[in-house]
Image: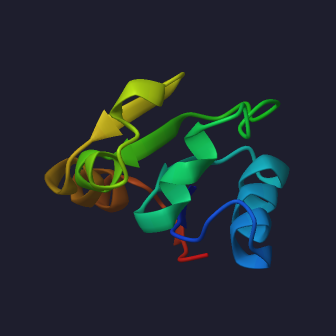
Amino acid sequence: MLVLIKSSPHTSEGKRGLKIARDTSSDIVLLQDGVYFMINDMLDGFCGTAYAVKEDVALRGLSDVIRGVKIIDWDDLIDKMVEEDKVVGMF
């Protein structure tokens, strides 16, 4: 399963999206303000693969804090969504 998270880590929606991903051992894609999960080790303990959309990372000036997150573009996101059995979001 793939979980799309667009809300910042300080919102209940963002926290819920990450919790669902952790509970179901799913991968996540960070979009919009969800890319803020990349900073301050907010993904510690997350065992799936984390992806972030390149444009959203760049728009928020976070290109230098990429740690353990794979950067993808919109075409890659569409491919990932097609490949997955289930896609859950947007939190």
Q: Nearer the viewer, residue 50 or 12?
A: 12
Position of 89 relative to 71 (above/below): below
Say which residue appears at 27% left-offset and 41% top-offset. Answer: 72
Say which residue appears at 79% left-offset and 48% top-offset. Answer: 22
Picture quadrant where residue 78 is located = bottom left
Image colouring: rainbow
- In the picture, which quadrant includes the C terminus? bottom right
Say which residue appears at 78% left-offset and 30% top-offset. Answer: 44
Residue 50, image x and y in percent?
Answer: 53, 38
Q: Nearer the viewer, residue 39 or 1?
A: 39
Q: How many marks on residues?
A: 0
Residue 73, image x and y in percent?
Answer: 20, 48
- In the picture, which quadrant includes the N terminus? bottom right
Q: Nearer the viewer, residue 64 or 31?
A: 64
Position of 87 relative to 43 (above/below): below
Residue 77, image x and y in percent?
Answer: 28, 54
Q: Left or right? Give the position of 76 relative to 10.
A: left
Residue 55, image x and y in percent?
Answer: 23, 53
Say which residue appears at 27% left-offset and 46% top-offset. Answer: 58
Picture quadrant where residue 17 is located = bottom right
- In the image as oriented, which residue stretches furthest toward the front? 61
- In the image as oriented, which residue stretches furthest toward the left? 75
